[in-house]
Image (cartoon, helix red, strand yellow):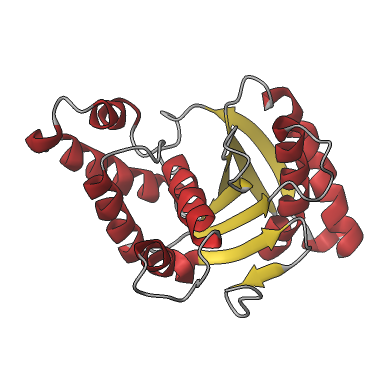
Amino acid sequence: MRILLDESGQQSETLPLMVGAVACPEPERLDDILNELHAELSAMDRFAGQASFDAFVKDGFHNWQIPFELQVQFISELEKLDGFRLYVCFSRRARLPTLTDDQRCLVLYRALLPDVYLAQKIDSVDLWFEENSTLGRHFKKVAEDSRADAVAKSDEDRVPQVNVRVVSKDEAPSLGIVDFAMAIIGQWLLQPAPRDLAQYKVRNFMAIERDVALIHDFDSGKRSTRLHRDFA
């Protein structure tokens, strides 16, 4: 099992700060699908010359700021894919308000990962963090400390062993799923009526909802799962 992780990074203080994980039992298969889709969409002439499209051609599905039509296409493809589960933890910066965004990302990882570990019914997992020049040196310790937290909640036998790598976007195309999921969920969380299908941001969330295993609100402590959407 490979678990890919990324953070939403520095953003406007009006937006939730978020970290996300996608658990992939067949990561190579998922990477192949995303590589094929990227090649197909990169060949579309009508977007040529747009800066956002050029960035997409170069970097793939790792930046929400790509042409809107391609966002819609990617969300449509995510709706059809199976074999992955999404986990996110977010904060509106209400709890522990003195933290910087970098510090908060590490705290959010520490809060999210025990739930991710305990959801995996296997002996070991590979944690692949997307490279980050500021946070990367902390990832191994966060992963290990989070595992200790999971053991404290359960027992040693139920918590998988953890192997940590820091990878580039090129090494793991499936990281694009984490990026897009965080953007979709972050926009959905800002909606005043989260089940209003007249709003496209609500429809975007509902397109991926079946694969969203957990949304953890760090500030309130609420956990919204596939079986029980504690906030919706």
Give the answer, above or below, for where 148 lies relative to 102. below
Is 224 displayed left or right of 185 in the figure? right
Q: Quadrant of residue 37?
A: top left
How far from the left and from the top, in percent, is residue 219? 77, 56
| Quadrant assignment for the C terminus | bottom right
Q: Is residue 31 visible?
A: yes
How far from the left and from the top, in percent, is residue 167? 54, 29
Q: Is residue 121 visible?
A: no
How far from the left and from the top, in percent, is residue 109? 72, 45
Q: Nearer the viewer, residue 126 or 80?
A: 80
Q: Residue at x 88, y 63 (%)?
A: 153
Q: Residue at x 63, y 79 (%)?
A: 228
Q: Nearer the viewer, residue 182 or 33?
A: 182
How far from the left and from the top, in percent, is residue 57? 25, 29
Give the answer, above or below, for where 71 lies relative to 213. above
Q: Nearer the viewer, residue 15 or 155?
A: 15
Which residue is at the far left?
Answer: 45
Q: Residue at x 26, y 25 (%)?
A: 51
Q: Residue at x 87, y 57 (%)?
A: 151
